[in-house]
Image: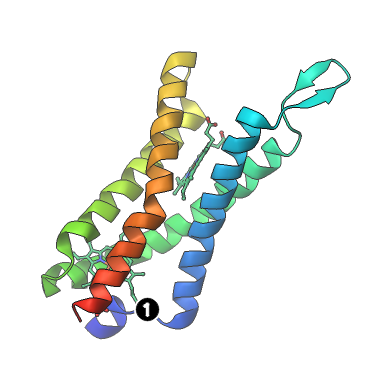
Amino acid sequence: MSRVALRFPRKAKALLYGNILLSFCTGVVWFALHRWGKVEGEFGTEFNPLEPWLLKIHGASAFLAMMGFGYLLATHVHVGWRSRRSRRLGMTLVGTVALLMLSGYLLYYSAGEDFRSAVSWVHLGLGVSLPLTLGTHVWLGHRRR
Ligand code: HEM
Ligand code: HEM
């Protein structure tokens, strides 16, 4: 059981990586279009019409990834902690995901331009760092095996 919780079956890994990748790409492409992808519309310069679609896909894939995260908390994190390996980077990952969830929530519900803009930068920074932290965690975990 503990081995299974530490190392995932191929399909579970593909699902987790796929959802994280989709959240990552939709978030980054949204950011690029929002900054540099404005279009000329009937009433002058407008935001790109793809933006709302990207955020819809982003929200959906992020929530699916969070279901995977909940499963990992009850299995992988529990067993990983007891194995005493990869604790620091593992907990950094848990913290990053928790802050992504909190900042995602605040993006959705907070009012006030300045505060929302600050949260948006924090969310983007955490999101961009996620594949790097996860990649290093997996790589070091395999090396220390
Ligand atoms: C959001 C939190 C986490 C995620 C998404 C995550 C994800 C992963 C993934 C995808 C692997 C590679 C598994 C494989 O190739 O089959 C891995 C390996 C590993 N993780 Fe985590 N992890 C997380 C948190 C933690 C924590 C908190 C710990 C320890 C306290 C931990 C300990 C380990 C260990 C020891 C391995 C190596 C397993 C082995 O190859 O024998 N992880 N993790
Ligand atoms: C994987 C890396 C991620 C990146 C690069 C990323 C990036 C972004 C960006 C750029 C935005 C738009 C910010 C704005 O409106 O100012 C956004 C919105 C959002 N993100 Fe993420 N994000 C990531 C992961 C996540 C995760 C794990 C969650 C889980 C809760 C999440 C939840 C949300 C929510 C709820 C919104 C607001 C959607 C809306 O306004 O309709 N994101 N994200």
Is residue 141 positioned above or below 57 on the image? Answer: below
36 left or right of 84 in image: right
Q: Could you tell me residue 122's position as x and y percent? A: 38, 33
Residue at the spot x=35%, y=49% of the render?
97
Q: Could you tell me residue 34's position as x and y percent? A: 63, 30
For this rendering, which residue is in front, 26 or 94?
26
Q: Could you tell me residue 141's position as x and y percent? A: 24, 73
For this rendering, which residue is in front, 76 or 54?
54
What is the crowding at mark 1: few (fewer than 14 residues within 10 Å), some, or many (at least 20)?
some
Residue at the spot x=85%, y=23% of the render?
41
Q: Quadrant of the N terminus?
A: bottom left
Asked whether mark 1 lies closer than 8 Å to ligand 1, one says yes
Q: Quadrant of the C terminus?
A: bottom left
Name the kind of residue labelled 1 in the image.
Phe
**Secondary structure category for the residue under label 1:** loop
For the question of whether residue 75 can be seen, the reply is no
106 left or right of 73 in image: right
67 left or right of 56 in image: left
Q: Which residue is mark 1?
A: 8
